[in-house]
Image: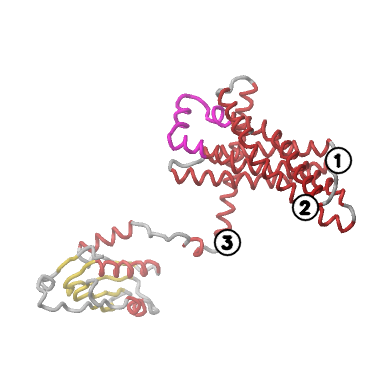
C-alpha cells in the first residue's frame, strides 16, 4: 500500500504527461566517498532499479567509506523510494559505511529516521531457526538455571510460612483448607480408581503372558503387588493430581494475579504464601498418601482381575500371594514417595500461578507450565528416592 506521495513537479498531477523513469547512478567522489544520484519518478507502480545491481556496484572492493545523495533530478517519490533507501542504508551500515542523508528531501529523512527507530518484526519461530545451536543451548541453560533459582527461592518462602504456621502466626482460613481437602481428595477418587485399576489390569495381563511360559502364573500377584505398592500407586496418584489439582491451583492463583487480588493481599500486609499457598500445600501433602493407598488397592484389584479371569487363579490364591509378597518396607516406600510427590505438585502449581502474567493467555501458559514442571520433578524425585531407599536398605 502506498503510504506517501511527494510530488516534486507537476508530472503526477498531469496524467497526460509521461513520468520520467526512475534512475540511480553512483558518482565516485574524494576520499572513498560515493554520491548516489537519484532522478526520475520513484513510485511503487513504476519499474524501480534493481537494488542488488547497485549493491554489487557499490560494495565491490575496495568499497566506499561513506555515501551521500544527490536528489536534484528527483521528480516524484513515494514509499517505494523510502523502502529502497532504507534497504540501501541498512546494507551500508552493516558494512560499516557511513550514510550522509543531508542530500535527501526532509520528508524522506523523517521516514528513514522513523523506520530505524522501529525494531524489525520477527516472524514466529524465526529465531529458533536462525540462532546457532550453541546460542540456543546456552539460552536454555540460562533459563533452566533461572527457573531453578526461582523454585528454590519459592521453596524458601514456603519453608518460612511453615515455620510461621508451627509457631501459630500463619494467617489463612481454616474453612478454605477443608474445602481444598475435599477438592483434592474425594473429588479425585473416580479418576484415580479408573486409572489405577486399568494400570493394574495391564500389568497383570502382561505378567501373566510372560510367567505362563514358565508355569509360574502365581507370581503375577507378586509382580503386580510390588510394582503398584512401591512405585506405581504413588506415581499414578501424583500424575493425576498434577494434571487435575496442580493445574487448578495455577489457574486459580493466575486468575487472582490478573484481578490484582494477590497485590491487594500484599497491600494489606498479608503474605500470599501463607494465605494462599500454605493451605494448598497442607491439603495435598495430607491427601496424596491416602489417595496412593487407595490407588494401591485399586491397582491390586485390577491385577487380580487379570490373574483370576485370564490366568485362572482363584481369588484366595491371588490375595494370599499378594499379602505374602508385600512387606511394610514396600508400603513405607510408597507412602514416602507419595508425600514428596504431593509437595512437588502443590509447590509447582502455586509457583506457576504466582508467576503468571496479567492476561488470560498468561494464565493458560502458567497452567501448562505447572503440569510440565510437576511431572518433570516427580520423575526426578522418583529416581532419587529409589536410590535413597536402596542406600538405606529400605528396598
Magenta highlight: main SS: helix
Q: Name the residue carrying label 3.
A: 134
Label 3 packing within 10 angstroms: few (<14), some (14-19), many (20+): few
Q: Which residues are magenta?
A: 251-277
Q: Nearer the viewer, mark 3 or mark 1?
A: 1
Q: Is residue 165 left or right of residue 40?
A: right
Q: Earlier in the sequence, mark 3 or mark 2?
A: 3
Q: Position of residue 136 (x, y in %)?
A: 55, 59
Q: How far apart are the alpha carbons under marks 3 and 1? A: 61 Å
Secondary structure under badge 1?
A: helix
Number of the front mark, 3 or 2: 2
Label 2 sits on residue: 205
Q: With respect to residue 47, does 180 lie above or below?
A: above
Tell me the residue at 74%/48% (across/down).
201
Q: Is residue 185 left or right of residue 6?
A: right
Residue that protrudes farthest toward the top in the picture: 168
Q: Residue at x 86, y 56 (%)?
A: 212
242, above or below 169, in the image: below
Amino acid at each position: 500500500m502506498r503510504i506517501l506521495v511527494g510530488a516534486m513537479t507537476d508530472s503526477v498531477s498531469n496524467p497526460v504527461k509521461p513520468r520520467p523513469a526512475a534512475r540511480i547512478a553512483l558518482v565516485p567522489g574524494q576520499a572513498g566517498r560515493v554520491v548516489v544520484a537519484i532522478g526520475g519518478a520513484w513510485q511503487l507502480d513504476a519499474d524501480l532499479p534493481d537494488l542488488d545491481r547497485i549493491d554489487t556496484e557499490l560494495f565491490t572492493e575496495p568499497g566506499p567509506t561513506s555515501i551521500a545523495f544527490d536528489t536534484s533530478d528527483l521528480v516524484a517519490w513515494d514509499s517505494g523510494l523510502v523502502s529502497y533507501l532504507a534497504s540501501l542504508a541498512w546494507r551500508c551500515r552493516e558494512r560499516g559505511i557511513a550514510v550522509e542523508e543531508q542530500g535527501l528531501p526532509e520528508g524522506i529523512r523523517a521516514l528513514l529516521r522513523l523506520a530505524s527507530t522501529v525494531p524489525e518484526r520477527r516472524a514466529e519461530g524465526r529465531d529458533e531457526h536462525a540462532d546457532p545451536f550453541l546460542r540456543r543451548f546456552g539460552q536454555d541453560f540460562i533459563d533452566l538455571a533461572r527457573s531453578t533459582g526461582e523454585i528454590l527461592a519459592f521453596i524458601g518462602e514456603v519453608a518460612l510460612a511453615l515455620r510461621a504456621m508451627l509457631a501459630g502466626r500463619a494467617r489463612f482460613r481454616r474453612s478454605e483448607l477443608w474445602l481444598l481437602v475435599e477438592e483434592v481428595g474425594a473429588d479425585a477418587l473416580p479418576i484415580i480408581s479408573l486409572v489405577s485399576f486399568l494400570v493394574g489390569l495391564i500389568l497383570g495381563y502382561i505378567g501373566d503372558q510372560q510367567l505362563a511360559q514358565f508355569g509360574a502364573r502365581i507370581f503375577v500377584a507378586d509382580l503386580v503387588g510390588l510394582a503398584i505398592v512401591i512405585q506405581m500407586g504413588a506415581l499414578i496418584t501424583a500424575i493425576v493430581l498434577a494434571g487435575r489439582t496442580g493445574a487448578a491451583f495455577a489457574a486459580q492463583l493466575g486468575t487472582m494475579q490478573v484481578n490484582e487480588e494477590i497485590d491487594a493481599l500484599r497491600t494489606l500486609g498479608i503474605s500470599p504464601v501463607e494465605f494462599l499457598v500454605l493451605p494448598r500445600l497442607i491439603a495435598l501433602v495430607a491427601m496424596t498418601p491416602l489417595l496412593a493407598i487407595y490407588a494401591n488397592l485399586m491397582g491390586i484389584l485390577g491385577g487380580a482381575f487379570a490373574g483370576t479371569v485370564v490366568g485362572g487363579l482363584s481369588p484366595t490364591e491371588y490375595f494370599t500371594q499378594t499379602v505374602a509378597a508385600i512387606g511394610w518396607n514396600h508400603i513405607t516406600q510408597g507412602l514416602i514417595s507419595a508425600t514428596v510427590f504431593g509437595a512437588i505438585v502443590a509447590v509447582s502449581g502455586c509457583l506457576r500461578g504466582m508467576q503468571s502474567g496479567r492476561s488470560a493467555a498468561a494464565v493458560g501458559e502458567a497452567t501448562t507450565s505447572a503440569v510440565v514442571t510437576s511431572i518433570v520433578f516427580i520423575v526426578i524425585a522418583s529416581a532419587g528416592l529409589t536410590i535413597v531407599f536402596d542406600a538405606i536398605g529400605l528396598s
